[in-house]
Image (spheres, helix red, strand yellow):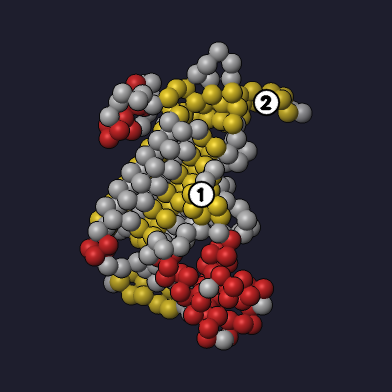
Amino acid sequence: MQELIQAAFADRTLLKEEKYEQAVRSVIEAVDKGQLRVAEPVAGGWQVNEWVKQAILMYFGIQKMKTWNVEPFEFYDKMDLKKGYEALGVRAVPHAVARYGAYIAPNVVLMPSYVNIGAYVGEGTMVDTWATVGSCAQIGKDVHLSGGVGIGGVLEPLQAAPVIIEDGCFIGSRCIVVEGVHIEKEAVLGANVVLTQSTKIIDVSGAEPVEYKGRVPARSVVIPGSYTKSFPAGDYQVSCALIIGQRKASTDLKTSLNDALRDFNVSV
């Protein structure tokens, strides 16, 4: 399938041939079932599968617009929605919406929320009320995306890594994580943390600050912060994120997601 997808992406006229169109549809079905991923863990890091992104982009092109009527609402779109939650072992609360082509693992809970095509949501994860999981975002097992969390999506550029939230993370209310930021295993973000590729992530838990960008180290406890930056018009405060400590190994994993924040007197 990879060869067919890459050939069709280079020459879109090939999509008029059944074998190329079927290859695109087969890839989306495999992504929907978790058999293929836009990005996957490999030895030493994560690998982005650009050709899977190519298939998703072409899928938009071959799908036809159609109308859905769910009285009194009407929708007009190209993408089908995910179905069969009971068989998948997924709890989907009204008005949870996931697009076909997003993988939702067993024991996931979808509160009224949105999961876009190409995303991967691991087993036991909670996608809380009004949280959004953008296209191709990779969410691990036993993650809690709290109310109003915004996980950014990415389709282009093809080589760009999606947002990655590894196993056991807690993402606090109204956090925003975009531009392929990588949150490593069991990290905890307090409410309102905003992370982009240019956001400074400063570890202030030791004698000297240590700065990161685009990555939150495993088991870090992170809160919003600011630092002073000079501009032609004067000195102003610029947002950053502060690592204020580490999750305690002695704390039970199931309760530490909330307790780790309370230990530091930080809002959930």
The residue furthest top is 207
What residue did someone put label 1 on?
A: 42
Q: Which residue is mark 2?
A: 229
Q: Position of residue 87 (x, y in %)?
A: 24, 65
Q: Residue lying furthest front in this view?
A: 43
Q: Position of residue 49 (x, y in %)?
A: 55, 59
Q: Pick whichever, 264 or 46, lies toward us.
A: 46
Taking 3 as reference, is 231 above or below it?
above
* Type of amino acid at the residue the image marks with label 1: Val
Residue lying furthest left: 86
Q: Provide residue 64's location: percent of width, then percent of height.
A: 48, 79
**Residue 147: which quarter of the image?**
top left
Foreground residue among 192 and 56: 56
**Mark 1, residues whose alpha carbon is within 10 Å: few (<14), some, or many (≥20)?**
few
Circle 2 sits in a helix, a strand or a loop, which is it? strand
Q: Residue at x 58, y 39 (%)?
A: 214
Residue under the point 62% across and 56% down? 159
Q: Residues within 10 Å of mark 2 (few under 14, many from 20)?
A: few
> Along the horizontal axis of the image, is 153 left or right of 33?
right
Q: CA distance from mark 1 to mark 2?
A: 38 Å
Q: Amino acid at mark 2?
A: Lys
Residue at the far right in the pictured view: 232
Q: Tell me which residue sits at (61%, 76%) in the image.
A: 8
Picture quarter with the C terminus = top left
**Secondary structure at numbered mark 1:** strand
From the image, state whether disc 1 or disc 2 is nearer to you: 1
Question: Residue sitting at 53 percent across and 30 percent down?
Answer: 241
In primary-sequence order, the first of circles 1 and 2 is 1
